[in-house]
Amino acid sequence: MIRYAVAVLLLSTIPNAAYAAPVDLKCYLETESGRQDWAITLNEETGTVTYSHPMRTATVKAIFTAEEVIWSYGDLKINRVNLSFVRDLGLMGPRTLAHQLGGARGQAYLDEAKRKLQADPDRARFIDQGKCEVVQVQRAF
């Protein structure tokens, strides 16, 4: 009996990751062509983001930090503190092409694209900003 009690005591001191239920968000981005609505589900346990907007629906891997959720090569971010939503289109195309090229050739292409963007005084036009709100999902069972 004492061994059992000691084992339970030891196991209770081992830290374990808390289960975080997926979070559903309703978001929007202000784009050049107007407001774009997004439905987003953040699943920290699986390390994924599922999103749906007028052009695409997908589930992708994401990075969850204390302050942000980042996906799509860092081009899409949600701030976990204030729920701001940002899409940085500046490197989205070049990153995708660099990934397809691969290796040193892809990295050289990406470095050149970064250099050109840093020299561009109108860089802000490549960034869409918006906001998210948490959706309270109503379930029947």
Image (tube, helix red, strand yellow):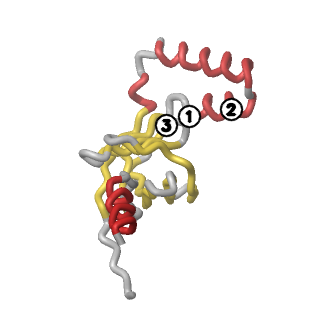
Q: Earlier in the sequence, mark 1 or mark 3?
A: 3
- Could you say which is closer to the camera, residue 4 or residue 122? 4
Q: CA distance from mark 1 to mark 3?
A: 6 Å
Marks 1 and 3: CB-CB under 8 Å?
A: yes
- Identified by mark 2, the residue type is His
- Tag shown at residue 51: none
Residue 76 visible? The answer is yes
The residue at which mark 3 appears reads as 75
Quadrant location, the N terminus = bottom left
In which quadrant will I find the C terminus? Answer: bottom left
Q: Is residue 25 visible?
A: no
Tell me the SS state at disc 3: loop
Q: Is residue 99 left or right of residue 38?
A: right
* Circle count: 3
| Kind of residue indicated by mark 1 | Met
In the picture as drawn, the residue positioned furthest to the front comes out as 2
Where disc 2 sits, the SS reads: helix
Residue at position x 49%, y 54% in the image = 49
Q: Which mark is residue 92?
A: 1
* Residue under the image location 41 percent in, 57 percent down: 37
Where is mark 2, residue-wise?
99
For image coordinates 62% across by 28% down, the residue present is 94
| Residue that appears at 62% across and 21% down | 110
Q: Secondary structure at mark 1?
A: helix
